Amino acid sequence: MAFQITEFHTIRKELESYNAKLIAVSKKKSIEDIQEAIDAGQKSFGENYVQELLDKESHFKKKTNWHFIGHLQSNKVKMIVPFVHLIQGVDSFKLLTEINKEGKKINKIIDCLLQVHIAQEETKFGFSEEEVEALMLFPELAELENIRIRGLMGMASLSSDASLLKKEFSSLKNLFNNSKLMSFDPDEFDTLSMGMSSDYKIALDCGSTMVRIGSTLFGERN
Ligand SMILES: *Cc1c(COP(=O)(O)O)cnc(C)c1O
């Protein structure tokens, strides 16, 4: 299935009134699909796998802003740091220090979001809300001069229960507000990435500033 241009324009229109940004999640989608999205005016894309991202980056170069939204292994940080626009899934202090180290080597400040575990499903990825608050007050964080924490990212439960999703997104928004106050530079702590194809409308109503949409734009993934 090709890029869904009608859906794209509908979503862009919806986002306008929230002043929210669209990340087109292109994982497992072809160069041709991405090109269609670029032709329609999309610039920011999200990818989950490092090798796939490297292949696509070498094709599109400066035509796209790449967001890494998957689980990033420390040993792969150096491969994406030179060009990545925002690393959304930072889920440990160790990973932050690794990103800082690689950023320093090339004299680049890397924008990151902390991933927070808000869903009911068990997963080993993501900070708990308590861990985020503790981290924001961590003195060592100030020493990581080559990272800039721009905000938080989270995924709600795989559920169609709107009241549950609302509860989870609202709680993330709350944590975002508190963390922003604790941030070294609250003006730069400006991104709350929440909402996917199935739940982005609820996320927007709960204060999302960035939605990550894949299947609605590109069709279901195999
Ligand atoms: C795949 C993915 C998305 C997009 O999911 P859709 O349901 O296809 O919109 C968003 N965020 C993350 C972190 C993902 O891995």
Image (tube, rainbow, N blue to C red):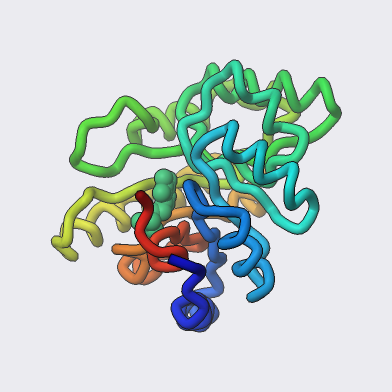
In x, y percent, where is residue 109? 76, 35
Say if 23 sits above or below 50 in the image: below
- The structure residue drawn at horizontal position 70% and vertical position 23%, both measured from the top left corner, is 78
71 or 206: nearer the viewer: 71
Question: Does residue 146 appear left or right of residue 33 in this picture?
Answer: right
In x, y percent, where is residue 145? 74, 27
In which quarter of the view is residue 142 placed? top right
- The structure residue drawn at horizontal position 60% and vertical position 47%, both measured from the top left corner, is 67
Quadrant assignment for the N terminus:
bottom left
Say if 107 sits above or below 161 in the image: above
Question: Does residue 97 appear left or right of residue 197 in this picture?
Answer: right
> How many numbered circles does the render carry?
0
207 or 195: nearer the viewer: 195
In which quarter of the view is residue 141 placed? top right
- The structure residue drawn at horizontal position 29% and vertical position 50%, both measured from the top left corner, is 156
Q: Is residue 173 visible?
A: no
**View extreme (right): residue:** 107
- The structure residue drawn at horizontal position 63% and vertical position 19%, both measured from the top left corner, is 98
Q: Is residue 44 visible?
A: yes
In x, y percent, where is residue 128? 33, 32
In which quarter of the view is residue 196 placed? bottom left
46 or 193: nearer the viewer: 46
Question: Does residue 34 appear left or right of residue 178 in this picture?
Answer: right
